Image: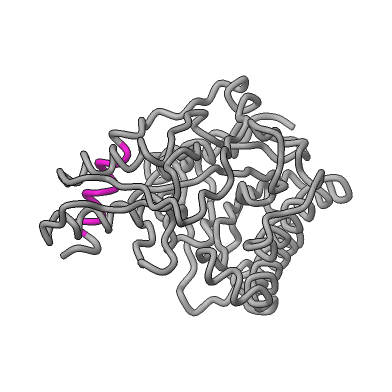
Amino acid sequence: MSRYALSGKRIYVAGHRGMVGQALVRRLESEDCEILTAERSLDLREQAEVRRWFSDNRPDAVILAAARVGGILANSERPGEFLYDNLMIAANVIETARRQRCEKLLFLGSSCIYPKHAEQPITEDALLTGALEPTNEAYAIAKIAGLKLAASYRREYGCDFISAMPTNLYGPGDNYDPQSSHVIPAMIRRFHEAKLSGADSVAIWGSGTPMREFMHVDDLADACIFLLREYSEEGHINVGSGEEVSIRDLAGLVAQTVGFEGRIECDTTKPNGTPRKLMDSSRLRAMGWTSSVGLEDGLQTAYEAYLSDVAR
């Protein structure tokens, strides 16, 4: 299919209150399009509500960033909720977009769709080649179902529906809850609070040696708009920065950003997790897109957002 022009189009961002959704709205504001968002009362798990909203608002294109999300604890304690809610959100939005003859749909997955022991860096064809990470299996299965639904609708009905799999994200709008946040927002909060309390040291989990890839959420939003325009294939596509950092070096960068000058200690009684988790985003780079927000600059914007939104 040919390049998809955004000019004059009505584009629905599903999940506009989340970190990714907020970034998508920010990015779309620089395009010649009308941004559609739904009121909080719209329950995407309810088919009739979704159909009614689509009928009333008639989007030309959809970016599906809505999801039930949470950390390891929430995923492991409420797997039924995570599986059902994310299945319903994906099925209702994708099916209704087909019924309403939406011109384009982009479904956003997660790197957790890949097998726990996938070869590194992880290529798109690693999907369904091995067992999933047990702690977020329910979420991953729902995301796999969503991307397969989008691909199946392309094959059966000719819908221009695509899927993208982002790497670990951070940035403005992140979740800083001590119980459920991911590694960067958790570190920002802990180092900030340690600085305020005058603590001598901060301990990080494990040996600090595991390698992780991170991408600023504004980079993901830019990649999504690029893919909406340029990508039209059945297979999902990875979206990553291509840059790795050890957890120990990441902690050093966060401490520097926050202004914490104490010691960083490694609590080796705590688990390390996977030694390495890197997405192979060479297909996206070959299309002409690369990330532009470096980790140091990105951490600075994330910390500024934390100070203005959370640490007031």
Q: In this view, does 250 lie above or below 312?
A: above
Identity of the residue furthest to the front in this view: 269
Residue positioned 47% across, 43% down in the render: 221
Q: Quadrant of residue 74?
A: bottom right
Front-lying residue, 288 or 241:
241
Give the x, y percent position of residue 220: 48, 41
Query: Can you say which quadrant of the picture contains the N terminus?
Result: top right
Q: Is residue 68 above or below residue 248?
A: below
Q: In the visual, does 84 lie left or right of 53?
A: right
Q: In the visual, does 72 lie left or right of 214?
A: right
Q: Give the range drawn in magenta.
A: 298-308
Residue 215 visible in the current orientation:
no
Identity of the residue furthest to the right in this view: 156
Q: Is residue 277 part of the magenta span, yes or no? A: no
Front-lying residue, 219 or 14:
219
Give the x, y percent position of residue 209: 46, 38
Q: In the visual, does 263 lie left or right of 175?
A: left
Q: In this view, does 139 lie above or below 129?
A: below
Residue 92 visible in the current orientation:
yes
Q: In the visual, does 79 lie left or right of 298?
A: right
Q: Is residue 300 part of the magenta span, yes or no? A: yes
